[in-house]
Each structure stands twice: as C-alpha cells, then as structure tokens.
Amino acid sequence: MNMWLHGNPTSDIRQGNTLASPEFTNENKNELKTFDYAVANPPFSTKSWTNGLNPSSDVYRRFDGYDNFPPQKNGDYAFLLHMIKSLKSTGKGCIVLPLGVLFRGNAEADIRKKIIQKGYIKGIIGLPPNLFFGTGIAASLIVLDKENAANRKDIFMIDASKGFMKDGNKNRLRERDIHKIVDVFNNQIEIQKFSRSIPISEIADPKNDFNLNIPRYIDSQEAEDLQDIEAHLLGGIPNSDIDALSEYWDVYPSLKTSLFSKTKR
C-alpha cells in the first residue's frame, strides 16, 4: 500500500527471511540478485538472525573475507554484509543501523576494519535519538559506494544528532534538517561541529583503531560559556568577546581600533 501511495504500483514486494532465505536471487537460487541502488532499515540488533542460517556455510558467501562472523546474538553486521553483497560492482546503498555498529569491539571490530579497508563506506550520518517507533536509541545512516572503492581515501561524516523537533513523544527531522544533511553530504561541505571528511589513515591510526564513533572525529559540543568576572565588575567589554569577532577584524583591520580602546585598570 505504501508503494502504491508513493507512485510505485509495479514494485516487486516479497515477504521472507532476508538472511536465511533471501527472495531476490538468480534463477538457480545460488547467487544474490545485485542492484545499482539499495536502501534498508533492518530490525536493530536482532538476536535471532541465525535462525535457519549457518554463516560458515552460507551459500551466498556474504561473510567471506571478513575474518569473522557477526555475533550470534546481534545481527546488525549480518544485514550490512547482506547489503554489500547485494550491490553491483558500482552499486550504492544506505542502511539504517544503531550507533553501536560504529564502535563495538570483538567480532564486529574485525568486520568493520575489513569493510573500511575495502573502501565500501562513503559516509556516515549520525541521527538524533528517538526518531523511530519501537526504540528510543540513536541511529546512524551508513552510506555505501562500491564504485572506485579500492581508491577511497576518506569517509565523510556528519553529526546531525542535534537537528530535530519534538513531535509528541518522538523526535522528528524538520525539512530544514533533511535539506542541510543532503546538501552538506552531496557537496561534501565541511562545517565546524557538524561535518568533516575523515582520512582513512586517521581512522586506521592505532589511537583510533578503525573505531568510527563520530565524536572521535567531530567535536559537536558547544563551547563553554566562560565569563570574565573582572570585566563585568569594572565595566567594559571582555577581550575574549572582542577577539571572537576576529573574522570581521580580518576584513576591516582598522575597525577594531576605531570602536574599542583598552581600559586602564
């Protein structure tokens, strides 16, 4: 019904178990059908992802080459690897997953390292908490792009966790929030405290060890509001407030001295 309402009456919708028995395969059922574009919003951290599936003997070889299998009680990376396998060699995709996939350790850390080294991740967008029904946890968008993946040198990150409005007992992205995310990502615009292109060499540095937790790379915390008590007591404008307008003084060098003078204390 949703596809009909959005003008896609010929859409091909199939019900089944994506991991144990995927519906979109070739005629022989031994290869996944691959796509130019794919989007997915799988169940978060499902504990039953191995029902009907033995990852070590997966006929579709979705887990080959990653040095480990997703944890038995957490299927987030199973769905991510399924999407990667379902993309053509130049395919692009986006999947919604909990923030934990960016930094959890053990088996997931091994898989994450391999995915980064293969260059499949083009971008990561951190979303606000409480957006989705059924869970209040924050989620992320993992943007995949296989085209020229072997030569990828960076991952573009956006911290969009603060742009939303309250809508009843849930949060909701406003049109302006969505527009900003899309515009910044498509144009790879770096904005302080919001977005940054992270070199893979920095992600691979031992101090980060392929951890993709967004706060490691983007400091979105508001600066502490420091008060100049002496200036408040004796009058005048604190020097720190004047220095904060440095971008104006750079354009009009003489304006600062015309407007302000130092007060003897």
Image: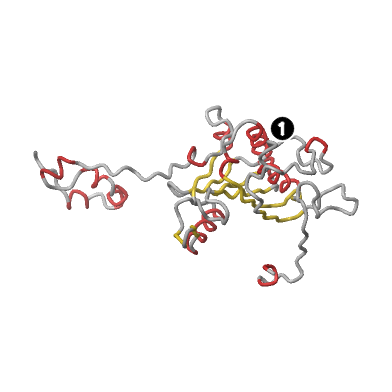
Q: Is residue 53 above or below residue 169?
A: above
Residue 204 percent coordinates (x, y): 58, 32
The quarter of the displayed image where residue 16 is located: bottom right
Q: How many marks?
A: 1
Farthest residue toward the left?
265
Residue name at image x 28 percent, y 46 percent:
244
Query: Along the line of sight, which residue is nearer the eye, 161 or 116?
Result: 161
Tell me which colouring the rendered structure shows: secondary structure
Residue 237 percent coordinates (x, y): 17, 47
The quarter of the displayed image where residue 148 is located: top right
Q: Is residue 172 above or below residue 157?
A: below
The quarter of the displayed image where residue 113 is located: top right
Residue 71 percent coordinates (x, y): 68, 36
Residue name at image x 9 percent, y 38 percent:
265
Q: Secondary structure at mark 1?
A: loop
Query: Along the line of sight, which residue is nearer the eye, 39 or 169?
Result: 169
Question: Is the residue marked by circle 1 packed among few (<14), some (14-19), or many (20+) residues within 10 Å?
Answer: some
Quadrant position of the N terminus in the picture? bottom right
Residue name at image x 61 percent, y 47 percent:
97
Judge left or right: residue 120 versus residue 177: right
Residue name at image x 22 percent, y 42 percent:
227
Residue 120 percent coordinates (x, y): 67, 43
Residue placed under numbered mark 1 in the picture: 68
Farthest residue toward the right?
28
Judge left or right: residue 94 versus residue 53: left
Q: Amino acid at mark 1?
A: Asn
Farthest residue toward the top?
206
